[in-house]
Image (cartoon, helix red, strand yellow):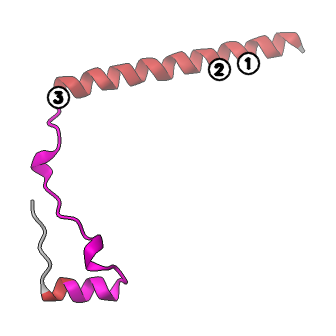
Amino acid sequence: MNLRLTSSSSATLRTAAVRNRQVVNTDLTSLPKTTASQMEEESARLKRLVADRSLDKHMLSEALRKKV
């Protein structure tokens, strides 16, 4: 997807106090393609990470409670 500045978009950018040089052409085809299975693997990894941290927090709070 390429974005081009037209006269109306330039006026809009000036109104929004944005300079033309700050607008970057965006090409979504250059982004890495992620498959559904890769996303599922990453989701599972993150869920395990959250579960580990939750368990650590629970164990620490139990240890503090027993100490006091």
The numbered disc on residue 61 is 1
Q: For the C terminus, which image quadrant?
A: top right
The magenta span reads 10-34
Instruction: Look at the numbered discs 1 and 3 and tell me whether their residues touch, using CB distance below 8 Å.
Output: no
Kind of element beneath mark 3: helix
Question: Which residue lies at the image location 14% right of the left edge and 88% below the top edge?
Answer: 7
Instruction: Look at the numbered discs 2 and 1 and tell me whether their residues touch, using CB distance below 8 Å.
Output: yes
Location of residue 38 by image quarter: top left
Tell me if residue 41 is in the magenta stretch.
no
Residue 15: percent from the left, percent from the top?
A: 33, 88
Mark 1 to mark 3 CA distance (whole Å): 37 Å
Residue type at mark 1?
Ser
> Residue 60 versus residue 2: which sits nearer the camera?
2
Earlier residue among tags 1 and 3: 3
The numbered disc on residue 57 is 2
Kind of element beneath mark 1: helix
Residue 58 lies, with reference to residue 26, above or below; the image says: above
Mark 3 to mark 2 CA distance (whole Å): 31 Å
Kind of element beneath mark 2: helix
Residue type at mark 2?
Lys
Mark 3 nearby-residue class (10 Å; few <14, some 14–19, many ≥20)? few
Mark 1 nearby-residue class (10 Å; few <14, some 14–19, many ≥20)? few
Residue 37: percent from the left, percent from the top?
A: 18, 23
